[in-house]
């Protein structure tokens, strides 16, 4: 008996789709490298959170108070490879954004989109304002889509008949890493599961391969769960404190939804909304549209920041590319599958992106930006409550750090050797502490009660000699310390307002029972 093996040819459209995805991803990566170089040249420094992530990278753990461990690994790798290079530190986040663009094209291909649809979808993801912003700094946010979208791609390919063993494994690894990156992955997976359970496609969940994939994601995320248990659910305490104190701007539903349109670009709405409608109208793909709707409603109900929804949009842009391809199927450029099937639209998108780019990425000097914002009547849409800065928060949090470090370094060098050996520095928040730890050299131990800095402890800092950054008046310290001197001010005019009202104190012989080493529990500030 002769046995014949039939080898099925691979999809001939896959290679061109991969090549196109790589092209758009490269454009994205090159843009952010050039942008970081230019920002450094015109005077923008490190973003507040970048200091914190970099110091977390020096304290690698399976969890942190306000984030998952992936961003710390990213920071550690970036610092190890590139030192203090602003471009190098942000390179991996730019890579995460490039992967998002590439995955958009591949998801579009998996949904039946040809080159014209793929290019349209990737173009709008590439220029989306929210992505231009978050991919330009060291952050876990730039990698969210890079972990979420492989889950979508895996499920689509399983429904198309690809190997469930392979793709459920990819699903499990990607979802597990996503949970280690940011807790919001949990809500995405819940929305995805509900979307499937509400449609006939639910059967994909009840297979041994699905069970293995889900088991894999749980196994990968388990160390972080153990960390949370060991540290008394620190992240839940952090979230609770922020909610109770009204830290974030809570938007009503209509404003929240409107912000989705603005942060993704007005023209982009014509693509991703078309994609959502397309998915909801397709019986075999309705689960995808429902997953988005469930996730959006959940974020609104929880009072989340509007950008928390942003990682989910690439698959809607991908579906929108398919919807446009079908709607304009009769056009010659679509029929011949030109990469740029809508040249006028593409030109308009590029021009508008160039016009509004300074609102999303700091490419103008501060004074020029203020004139630009005034001319275009741009709103200041900060996502956290508090007094507004001269610049938007996303820009203002890049100023004042080197000045802080310089003042404290000068003060430390003027101490006697005896005082210097006993000195400690108390920072008000992780931005101030992180800047000192990252930019400072040969400084005394820096401590803070803010988030993970509190877990790293008081480092034996006592009350003999203290340098303190505080918004409290001198009278507050005069009741606690024998000698109080004001040795500096946090007063950079472009920094956040709460950083402009602080003074730098040099304190001698403070009450020992009020110092970090004796009273560290009272310094705890999860916020």
Image: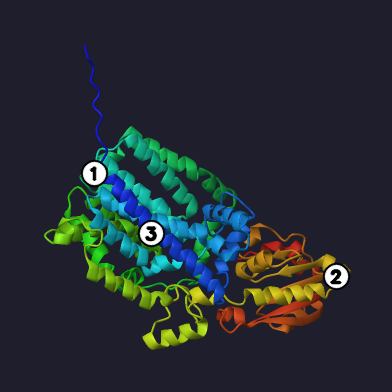
Report if residue 390 is visible in the image.
no
Q: From the image, tell me which residue sits under label 3.
A: 311
Q: Residue furthest top?
A: 1
Q: From the image, tell me which residue sits under label 1.
A: 201
- Image quadrant where residue 255 sits: bottom left
User: Is residue 284 placed above or below 98 in the rendered structure?
Assistant: above
- The circle drawn on residue 126 is none
- Image quadrant where residue 349 sits: bottom left
User: Is residue 452 placed above or below 306 in the rendered structure?
Assistant: above
- Element marked by disc 1: helix
Residue occupying image coordinates x 56% and y 48% = 229
The answer to whether residue 183 is left or right of residue 159 is right
Viewport quadrant of the C terminus: bottom right
Label 2, residues with CA under 10 Å away: few <14, some 14-19, many ≥20: some
**Labels 1 and 3: the sequence-earlier one:** 1
**Labels 1 and 2: the sequence-earlier one:** 1
Tag 1 near tag 3, CB within 8 Å: no
Residue occupying image coordinates x 51% and y 72% = 38
- Element marked by disc 3: helix
Residue occupying image coordinates x 46% and y 50% = 179
- Element marked by disc 2: helix
Q: From the image, tell me which residue sits under label 2.
A: 419
- The percent position of residue 156, horizontal first and vertical second, equals 28, 46
Tag 1 near tag 2, CB within 8 Å: no
Residue closest to the eye, 85 or 208: 85
Alpha-carbon span between mark 1 and mark 3: 23 Å
Residue occupying image coordinates x 58% and y 53% = 77
């Amino acid at each position: 008996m002769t046995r014949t093996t039939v080898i099925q040819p691979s999809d001939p459209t896959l290679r061109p789709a991969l090549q196109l995805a790589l092209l758009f991803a490269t454009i994205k990566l090159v843009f952010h490298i050039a942008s970081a170089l230019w920002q450094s040249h015109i005077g923008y420094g490190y973003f507040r959170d970048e200091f914190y992530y970099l110091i977390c990278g020096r304290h690698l753990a399976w969890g942190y108070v306000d984030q998952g461990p992936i961003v710390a690994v990213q920071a550690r790798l970036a610092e190890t490879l590139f030192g203090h290079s602003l471009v190098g530190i942000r390179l991996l986040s730019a890579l995460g954004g490039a992967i998002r663009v590439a995955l958009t094209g591949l998801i579009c291909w998996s949904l039946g989109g040809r080159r014209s649809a793929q290019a349209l979808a990737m173009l709008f993801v590439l220029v989306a304002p929210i992505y231009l912003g978050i991919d330009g700094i060291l952050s876990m946010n730039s990698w969210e889509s890079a972990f979420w979208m492989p889950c979508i791609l895996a499920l689509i390919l399983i429904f198309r008949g690809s190997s469930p063993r392979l793709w459920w494994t990819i699903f499990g690894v990607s979802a597990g890493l996503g949970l280690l990156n940011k807790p919001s992955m949990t809500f995405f997976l819940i929305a995805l599961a509900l979307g499937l359970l509400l449609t006939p496609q639910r059967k994909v969940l009840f297979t041994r391969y699905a069970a293995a994939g889900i088991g894999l994601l749980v196994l990968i995320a388990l160390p972080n769960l153990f960390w949370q248990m060991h540290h008394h659910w620190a992240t839940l305490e952090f979230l609770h404190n922020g909610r109770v104190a009204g830290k974030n701007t809570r938007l009503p539903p209509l404003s929240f939804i409107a912000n989705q349109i603005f942060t993704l670009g007005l023209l982009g709405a014509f693509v991703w909304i078309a994609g959502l409608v397309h998915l909801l109208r397709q019986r075999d793909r309705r689960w995808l549209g429902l997953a988005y709707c469930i996730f959006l409603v959940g974020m609104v109900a929880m009072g989340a920041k509007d950008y928390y929804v942003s990682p989910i949009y690439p698959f809607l842009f991908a579906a929108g590319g398919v919807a446009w391809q079908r709607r304009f199927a009769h056009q010659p450029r679509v029929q011949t599958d030109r990469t740029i099937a809508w040249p006028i639209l593409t030109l308009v998108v590029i021009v508008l992106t160039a016009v509004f780019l300074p609102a999303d990425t700091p490419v103008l000097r501060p004074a020029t930006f203020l004139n630009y914002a005034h001319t275009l009547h741009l709103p200041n849409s900060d996502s956290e409550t508090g007094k507004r800065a001269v610049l938007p928060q996303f820009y203002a949090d890049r100023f004042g750090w080197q000045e802080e470090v310089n003042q404290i370094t000068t003060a430390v060098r003027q101490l006697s050797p005896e005082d210097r050996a006993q000195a400690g520095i108390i920072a008000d928040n992780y931005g101030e502490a992180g800047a000192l730890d990252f930019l400072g050299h040969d400084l005394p131990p820096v401590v803070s009660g803010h988030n993970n800095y509190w877990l790293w402890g008081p480092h034996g800092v006592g009350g003999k000699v203290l340098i303190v950054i505080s918004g409290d008046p001198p009278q507050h310290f005069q009741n606690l310390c024998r000698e109080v001197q004001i040795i500096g001010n946090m007063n950079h005019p472009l920094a956040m307002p709460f950083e402009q009202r602080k003074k730098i104190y040099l304190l001698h012989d403070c009450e020992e029972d009020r110092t970090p080493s004796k009273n560290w529990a009272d310094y705890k500030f999860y916020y």
